[in-house]
Amino acid sequence: MAGEPAASMKVEPGAGLKIPRHIGVIMDGNGRWARQRGKRRTEGHVEGVKSLRGLVEHCVTYGVPCLTVFSFSSENWSRPSDEVSFIFNLLRRFVASDLQRLIRNNVRVRIIGSRVGLEPSLVKLIDDVEAKTQANTGLTLVVAFNYGSKAEIVAAARHLAEEVAAGRLSPDDIDEQRLGDALYTAGLPDPDVIIRTSGEQRLSNFLLWQAAYAEFVFVDEHWPDFDEASFVRVLETYTQRDRRFGGIGADAR
Ligand code: FPP
């Protein structure tokens, strides 16, 4: 039929959509998802891992080069200790169960955040997964774990101050590039989009420096309900945004 693609013609997933180079996600609402179903909070986190697995696949399918997810913030230590241990074990289980699939999908994993206070066996696991995937060239999956953005910026400032004190750097050499290179996210593009689920509208100490020009998309679903349709809606929203980076935008010229 005229105007319709022939049956053999495949429409690429994401055709007509602008694909961000980097998506950051604050996976919020696992606890509320569980409570609404009369389940324990930890069951919400288990479902949250399934959503994360799905999101990684969608990013691979739609050609998103980089995804950063906030999986444990430095402020999350204030939760009950059994919930904290549960989330730590989820990271171990996620790595154990998904490593082969990630390698098959050409995913490179980076785990960012402070390693201070983490058990040596967990640090070894993190080092291993990074080493085993570092040659992969597809999606870069960044897991922010024991991560806080203000602490990241402080650590970067301290590192640069030490370089100056040691005479290896002049204060005049410190610019945005140099500071960015001292952050955990060195070498990654800044996020184009930050998604937060569960209706909350704040950054909660996630990628504060890197998100300077990110588009924020807040969605009402709790994280375990975030599926491919939710992901496509975010891409549609992003596609419609007019990004001006402080300029006046194409329409105004
Ligand atoms: C936010 O929901 C979720 C977290 C703090 C933990 C996120 C962890 C996962 C999604 C699992 C993936 C984890 C790893 C380690 C790969 P919430 O508990 O703040 O929910 P609430 O705001 O409804 O209480």
Image (cartoon, grey):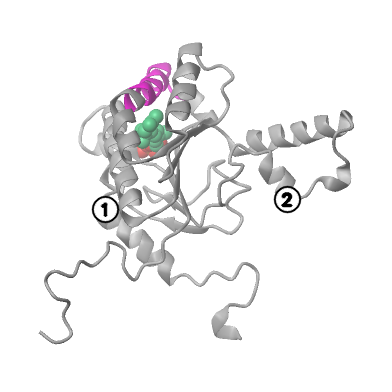
Residue identifier under label 1: 228
Left or right of 64: which side holds 188? right
**Residue 74 placement, left or right of 158:** left
Looking at the rendered structure, the kind of residue marked 2 is Glu
The answer to whether residue 81 is magenta is yes
Q: How busy is the neighbourhood of tag 1: few (under 14 within 10 Å), some, or many (20 plus)?
A: some
- Is residue 3 visible in the rendered structure shown here? yes
The quarter of the image holding the N terminus is bottom left
* Percent coordinates x, y for residue 3 in the rendering: 18, 85
Viewer-proximal residue, 157 or 31?
157
**Circle 2 residue:** 176
Q: Which badge, 1 or 2, is on the more N-terminal residue? A: 2
Magenta stretch, main secondary structure class: helix
Which quadrant does the C terminus fall into?
Answer: bottom right
Whether residue 2 appears in magenta in the rendering, the answer is no
- Other residues around mark 2 within 10 Å, as few (<14) / some (14–19) / many (≥20): few
Q: Which residues are magenta?
A: 79-94
Picture quadrant of ligand 1? top left
The spot of residue 95 in percent (x, y) is 36, 26
Q: Residue at x 21, y 32 (%)?
A: 38
Q: Position of residue 215 (x, y in %)?
A: 50, 60
The residue that appears at 39% across and 51% down in the rendered structure is 199
**Residue 23 % position (x, y):** 45, 51
- Is 38 on the left or on the right of 226, as rendered? left
User: Which picture quadrant has residue 178?
Assistant: top right
- Distance of label 1 from label 2 (alpha carbons): 35 Å
- Front residue of 13/44: it is 13
- The three-letter amino acid code for the residue at tag 1 is Glu
Please say if the residues under marks 1 and 2 sit with CB atoms less than 8 Å apart. Answer: no
Please say if 180 is above or below 62. above
Whether 242 is drawn above or below 233: the answer is: below
Q: Describe the element under mark 1 as helix, strand or loop.
A: helix
